[in-house]
Amino acid sequence: MAEKENLGNEEAQEERGTGTQVRIKFNTGNLKSSYVNFCNVTSTREEVILNFGLNKDWDRSQREIQVDLEHRLILSPFAAKRLHIMLTNLLDNYERRFGKINIEPVERTGIQH
């Protein structure tokens, strides 16, 4: 998606089951960006909750770390499934271009990057 000149609007096209395409316009005028290096997920029957935060403790010998949670997104299971599909496609393409992402723990602390 390319950013447009008209106050940060973005466009995407989505194909419907009927074979027609729907143009989606994203207004990014109030969009705020944050860096996070920690994510946690949980769910109920009706909701999927994504917590995002910042881990500032990089001493891997510590038995306890503190993560400052900064954002919580609450999605329906249907939106979460669509997010899962989009992230799977994105990461498959990323690994084809740049190589496999290894998320195995480096040390025995159980902490992953």
Image: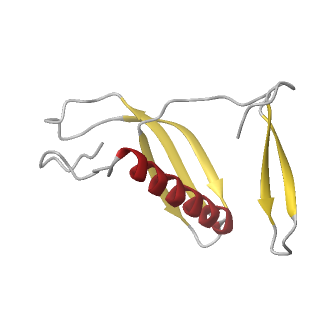
Position in image of residue 100 (x %, y %): 32, 52
Q: Position of residue 92 (x, y in %)?
A: 45, 57
The quadrant where residue 62 appears: top left
The chosen color scheme is secondary structure
State the quadrant of the C terminus: top left
Query: Can you name the residue that lies furthest to the front here?
Result: 97
Which residue shows up at 77% across the image and 32% down it? 28
Give the quadrant of residue 6: top right
Residue at 63% x, 68% y is 77
Q: Is residue 57 left or right of residue 22?
A: left
Q: Which residue is drawn at 67% across and 68% down?
A: 78
Q: In which quarter of the image is the N terminus?
A: top right
* 27 or 47: nearer the viewer: 27
The one nearer the camera, 67 or 23, is: 23
Residue 95, position as x, y percentages in the image: 39, 51
Query: How many numbered markers are drawn?
Result: 0
Q: Answer left or right for 110 relative to 52.
A: left
Q: Is residue 100 above or below residue 6?
A: below
